[in-house]
């Protein structure tokens, strides 16, 4: 029932729309993750973008890129009403499958300490906390670096 599809640069708009649905006002207010923003960030990177379809509807995604000897998980999310159905697990599984032949040493991600769902979910998926520091951008939160080694 869950289909994982590979996206490319022609699909940025789909990710931006989905991102707005998932993060709502925060994304709009900070003008985060517009198509321009994505193009700029990913222009010089070798990226992987995956979408998750549930009953043919796009409900989740992952965007990341190769960085040094690892893979940086930049953006991810699943629409609220579709969570806890294994959708993000399916995205991570597919990502790891795609990454296998590239022999990356680790997948790593950065998140804010208030992103509880993401934090718990990644810990359950074998990620560990390797760093935490007070955010300069948002001093009331910590920024947490997670990684999963292979
Ligand atoms: C984190 C997120 C992607 C998880 O998506 P999901 O489709 O609900 O995840 P899954 O159903 O595949 O669950 C994966 C695992 O995490 C666990 N999990 C997910 N959310 C959880 C929660 N809130 N509390 C406890 N466990 C949780 C599940 O039990 C499952 O564990 P298991 O593999 O041991 O069974 C989703 O909650 C989300 O989009 N959150 C906001 C995204 C975000 O903050 N992105 C920021 C980066 S840009």
Image (cartoon, helix red, strand yellow):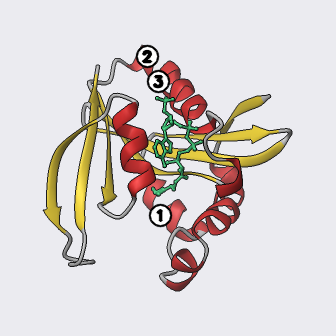
Q: Name the mark on residue 96.
A: 3
Q: Residue at x 53, y 25 (%)?
A: 93
Q: Is mark 2 within 8 Å of ligand 1?
A: no
Distance of label 1 from label 3 (alpha carbons): 25 Å
Image quadrant for the C terminus?
top left
The residue at which mark 2 appears reads as 100
Q: Nearer the viewer, residue 38 or 137?
A: 137
Does dot 3 land on a helix, a strand or a loop? Answer: helix
The residue at which mark 1 appears reads as 40
Q: Earlier in the sequence, mark 2 or mark 1?
A: 1
Q: Residue at x 60, y 29 (%)?
A: 90
Q: Residue at x 39, y 56 (%)?
A: 116
Q: Position of residue 112 (x, y in %)?
A: 32, 62
Does dot 2 land on a helix, a strand or a loop? Answer: helix
Using residue 120 as the reference point, say whether residue 134 is left or right of it: left
Image quadrant for the N terminus?
top right
Label 1 or label 3, whichever lies nearer to me, is: 3
Q: Earlier in the sequence, mark 1 or mark 3?
A: 1
Residue 85, above or below 110? above
Residue with the most extreme top position = 101
Circle 2 residues within 10 Å: few <14, some 14–19, many ≥20: few
Distance of label 2 from label 1 (alpha carbons): 27 Å
Disc 3 and disc 2 in contact, CB within 8 angstroms: yes
Circle 3 residues within 10 Å: few <14, some 14–19, many ≥20: some
Does dot 1 land on a helix, a strand or a loop? Answer: helix
């Amino acid at each position: 029932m869950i289909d994982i599809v590979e996206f490319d640069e022609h699909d940025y708009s789909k990710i931006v729309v989905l991102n707005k649905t998932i993060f709502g006002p925060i994304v709009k207010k900070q003008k985060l993750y517009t198509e321009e923003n994505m193009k700029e960030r990913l222009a010089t990177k070798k990226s992987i973008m995956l979408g998750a379809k549930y009953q043919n509807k796009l409900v989740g995604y992952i965007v990341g890129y190769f960085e040094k000897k690892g893979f940086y998980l930049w953006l991810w999310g699943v629409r609220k009403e579709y969570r806890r159905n294994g959708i993000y697990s399916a995205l991570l599984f597919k990502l790891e499958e795609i990454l296998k032949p590239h022999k990356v040493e680790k997948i790593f991600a950065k998140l804010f300490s208030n992103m509880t769902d993401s934090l718990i979910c990644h810990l359950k998926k074998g990620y560990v906390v390797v760093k935490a520091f007070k955010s300069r951008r948002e001093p009331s939160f910590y920024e947490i670096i997670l990684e999963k080694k292979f």
